[in-house]
Amino acid sequence: MEVILAILIGVLYAAGIYMILRRSLVKLILGIIILGNGANLLIFLLGRVVKGSPPIIPADSDVFQSVYADPVPQALILTAIVISFGLQSFAIILVKRAYKVVKTDDLDEMNAIDKDS
Amino acid sequence: MTQQLVLYPLLLQMFLSIVLMFCWRKISWQRVISIVGSIINVGVSIWLFSYIWENGTQIVLAGNWKPPFGIIFVADTLSATLVLLTAISGLAVSSFSSASVVAARLKFGYFPIFHFLLLGLNGAFLTGDIFNLYVWFEIIIISSFVLITLGGEKAQLEGSVKYFTLNILASMIFLTAIAVLYGLTGSLNMADLALKVAAIENRGLVSITAILFLVAFGIKAAVFPLYFWLPDSYHTPPSAVAAIFGGLLTKVGVYALIRVFTLIFVGDQFIENIILIMAVLTLFSGGLGALVQNNLRKVFSYLIICHIGYMIAGLGLFTEVAIAGTIFYLIHDIIVKTNLFMVSGLIFRMRGTNSIRNLGGLYADYPKLSLLIAIPLFSLVGIPPLSGFWPKISLIIAGFQAERWWVVGAIIFASLITLIVIAKVWANVVWKEKKELPVRLNFRYFDKLKTIRKAQMIAPMIFLSLVSLYIGFGAEHIQQVSSRVAGELMDNQQYIEAVLGKEQIIDHEE
């Protein structure tokens, strides 16, 4: 399971960075989304993947009896997902607006601000 | 009353932004609430600072979870100082923006978002939890995205696409770094991390994690190979927005670097060398970049980068004198850079352009205001006894003590370049003969503004110039603060003890 997840995360990071490096604005957003998912999975993986043992202390004991699934990474991922969701929706609106005003999807064409100086 | 004092600056800003949201369309109300709220905020921050100064580091546990389990807020002298500086800059920019930002922009929630930005800044300075720091960073960048795009002009949108991309990338790298760090240690509390990271045997992994943090915060702080987003975006939004960005946003990156590399990743020679090399290259590239620009705000943007180099250099040298220099520079820089961007906004209002080639004759038209403009400009260069001079002495002394001649050379070179740039700006903008510029239609020139609006623009500059002068002439007091901060930072046991309590540290050692 860990190996599969590690490979998947690697692919997601690579794909995300590749997409960000493209010139198209739409691919930029896709890249950011993929990279975000990669980062979330990375937190999940590095919090150690444990199967079938929720973090519940048995009634007749004061401490955990065996290895348990750490709940903290899941809380972190939840927070990160919500934040990246907000950022991504802002990104989509920004790109749409920029496309309407600048009338291009190509990042190399977006250099009007460098000309007036 | 004082038990939760650490949280008051946060709660006040949150309260202000929520109240402001209820007056969405009533701009004149918003102006008053924002300015009055900012004045109260300065009072609260002074209270917090003086309390910390007398009683030492204070902590607040969220939900009363014992550290290292819950989120924790820690106010040591560095945090309290930065919260105070944020409040001072915030007050100045709040007054300045109510006069200089056009009503069309204010109608779309400028002030609520502005106070959310200040909330994020205060949170980032006060938190003691690395993931919570990430959350505050996100609050900062989301607010800054709104502020930088508000108005939606062509140049603004182009600038903000770049700003947006690089900042999101920095956040992703930061998140990755947190994930790796959590995988290594299983903790998020910074004090606890300091203990656990020091105990890890695989130093290679620790160094790689440190590099991830360095890259993430390096993008935010705009250091040498990672700064290209800054000069492309900071001259596009209204100058009030640029003032708060230039004064505070890059400094959050510097603060995060200082915090992480004095508390968690300490004593790694490899990282310190990288930081020093980055600092020197930042000093060179920022200074030389400023030299060739023609747009006044682009010049100031490059100077931001150049002067980040000083702070990072102090961090890289990593002696008590050097860190004191860094802190002193941070204090001086926040005030002066905020003031400078407001100056560029004022010049834009007077002349309708920021192109240095086309400006001129300011002294002939506005002699008193020119003298006011001179204070931040020459404080930035550090002509003694103005404020930029004193921290450079500490940095140069630290460089000599560490026998890092190339760092000393770079610091002196960057000061010289800054002097040339500012002399060029002063000669061209203030002393050169006035050029006839085409009159811009539908543009509210400074002379046509109402007296109250003029006062709202000039008063914050006078206020910040006075603070600058105080930093320069009362350098002894600021030096006391920075020395104390440096002492606290160099000895990270103090911070750890304040957060975790003595018993836990002994437990850990056993």
Image (cartoon, grey):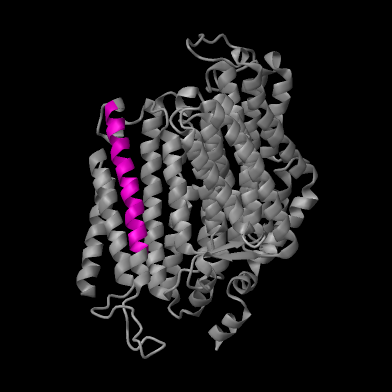
Residue depicted at x 38% and y 42%? B164
Question: Considering only vertical position in the picture, is B499 above or below A117?
Answer: below
Residue depicted at x 62% and y 28%? B343
Most common SS among magenta residues: helix
Residue A111 visible in image: yes
Residue depicted at x 25% and y 69%? A6
Residue B288 visible in image: no
Question: Considering only vertical position in the picture, is B460 above or below B215?
Answer: above
Query: Would you say residue B453 sits in the magenta stretch?
Result: no
Q: Position of residue B114 (x, y in %)?
A: 51, 39
B449 or B441: nearer the viewer: B449
Left or right of B407? Residue B245 is left
Query: Would you say residue A98 sits in the magenta stretch?
Result: yes
Q: Quadrant of residue B248?
A: top right
Q: Position of residue B186 (x, y in %)?
A: 41, 74
Q: Position of residue B144 (x, y in %)?
A: 45, 41
B90 or B467: nearer the viewer: B90
Residue depicted at x 64% and y 13%? B433
Left or right of B266? Residue B237 is left
- For the C terminus of chain B, which image quadrant? bottom right
Farthest-out residue, bottom: A60
B476 or B231: nearer the viewer: B476
Q: What is the total number of numbered labels drawn onto the structure image?
A: 0
- Please state the extent of the stretch shown in magenta in the rendering: A76-100
Q: Quadrant of residue B88?
A: top right
Left or right of A45? Residue B249 is right
- For the N terminus of chain B, which image quadrant? bottom right
B450 or A57: nearer the viewer: A57
